[in-house]
Image (cartoon, rainbow, N blue to C red):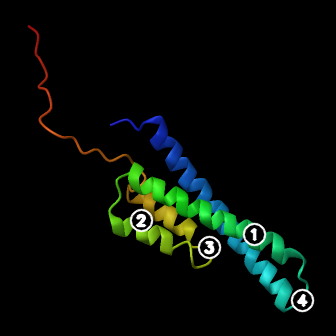
Amino acid sequence: MQPTAWQTLMRVAFHVVAIVEAITWAGLLWAMYARYVLDDDGPMEFWGITHGIAFIVFCVVATVAWFTFRWKFWVWVVAILMAVPPLMTVPLEIWYHRTGKLKPQTHRAGPQPAETVQS
């Protein structure tokens, strides 16, 4: 089955948002280092807000992907939980891509029409 434009958009969105979420985690870790070790509060506000927004966007995209790709409940739970530890959304995205969780799933109801043979 060919993916629809929406499924392609969701696959790309999941990929991009997973990377952005990991980058903002790295920025937040650097800001915490600057705050608590270097005694510099400057980057904390920027990276804190940026990461908070990226986390919420990742959770929304994962929830929409849950319905788009017809994930089982545990697949969605793992996606949400992997956004909590630092930098884990990138390995999650790689795992989901390799295991086909970001490919369209079809559940067809009823019998399919038979192919007609013309002679």
Q: Crowding at label 1, few (<14), some or many (≥20) Cα neighbours within 10 Å?
A: few
- Amino acid residing under circle 2: Trp
State the residue position of label 1.
49
Count of picture labels: 4
Vertical relation: 56 (above or below) 35? above
Q: Name the residue under label 3.
A: 87
Q: Nearer the viewer, mark 2 or mark 1?
A: 1
Per the rendering, the mark at residue 38 is 4
Q: What residue type is labelled 3?
A: Leu
Three-letter code for the amino acid on which mark 1 is drawn: Ile
Question: Depth-wise, is mark 2 or mark 3 nearer the camera?
Answer: 2
Image mark for residue 76: 2
The numbered mark, 4 or 3, whose residue comes first in the sequence reads: 4
The answer to which image quadrant residue 54 occupies is bottom right
User: Going 13% across and 38% down the picture, which residue do you hit?
Assistant: 110
Q: Earlier in the sequence, mark 1 or mark 3?
A: 1
Q: How far apart are marks 1 and 3 (CA)?
A: 17 Å
Occupied quadrant, residue 77? bottom left
Marks 2 and 1 in Cβ contact (< 8 Å): no
The CA span between labels 2 and 3 is: 18 Å
